[in-house]
Amino acid sequence: MGIIGHRQIVKYLKIARSKNQLAHAYLFIGPKSVGKRTTAENFLLSLLKLPKLDNPDLVNINRGSTTIGIDEVRNLKHFFQTKAFDEKIKLALVVDADRLTIEAQSALLKTLEEPKGDSLIILTTARPSKLLPTIKSRLEAINFYPVPRKELLLFLNKNGLLEVSRALLDESQNLPGRLLNLLRQKEKIAASQSIKLYQELDGLDLASCFNLAKNMSSQPNFDISQTLQVYLSAARSNLLKSLRSDGSDQTKIVNRLDLILKSFFRSACQVNKRLILESLFLQW
């Protein structure tokens, strides 16, 4: 995922790199879900010839809700002491560095005091008070703030999500990570509802087919392509299950796949959404 917002920070890091003035260690400070980790990962990857998170010259420590112990810091120290595999620089990212134990922080301090050759480490935290003052004094702090609403709107518009997601902006509190999580939750709910509808299509009578098509197509911001995509995925899943069993429903499922694909074509041709759904449901 690309960086949402934080243009000034990205610009600052790029300029420092172009002038060969990068610090050997940074501390990204900001609220949870503001974009610290994403910005750090994208920047570190930009420094590599092979920009992949599994690059052997990049260590990514992210322990979620668990603490980061001294053994991991010792491994990190050893990592920086060895030669790079195929890069000119060795990089490390410690996500939620406030989860470092006091013992681990003390061990990390030695690495920060004596940087080895071309190396760079970024720590992220939403709770800088949990870090030792001696740790913070050896890091260049960069503060992250909630992203302006207009930049989030720009992201939504660029990805075709503006109309269906505008209501989520207030709930996101202008935090990109929170906005993305809300979008994913919304997609899961929509997918679950569509799958349920797919399963219920078998039992519909004639009147119910017309009523369902009317109700679905009249919903604000109804996305027929998304609904058809869910139907397609569900039908494909059913077909695979049928192939693994006795295959008794194969012909019926293949016919349904054909109906869904034809509905996609009609949608692309700007046919009325309600008519597309009526035709699909009646032939189900």
Image (tube, grey):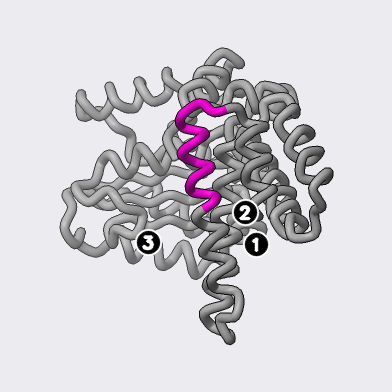
Q: Nearer the viewer, residue 64 or 117?
A: 64
Q: Nearer the viewer, mark 2 or mark 3?
A: 2
Gap in Å between the C-alphas at discs 2 and 3?
A: 18 Å
Q: Which callout, 1 or 3, points at the residue further toward the start of the chain?
A: 1
Q: Three-letter amino acid code at disc 1?
A: Thr
Gap in Å between the C-alphas at discs 1 and 3?
A: 20 Å
Q: Which residue is mark 2?
A: 99
Q: Nearer the viewer, residue 251 or 14?
A: 251
Element carrying mark 2: helix
Question: Marks 2 and 1: CB-CB under 8 Å?
Answer: yes
Q: Which residue is mark 1?
A: 66
Does the segment drawn in magenta span residue 135? no
**Side of 27 where 161 appears, left or right:** right
Q: Residue at x 37, y 39 (%)?
A: 42
Query: Which of the image's four quarters has the C terminus?
Result: bottom right
**Side of 126 where 171 appears, left or right:** right
Q: Three-letter amino acid code at disc 2?
A: Arg
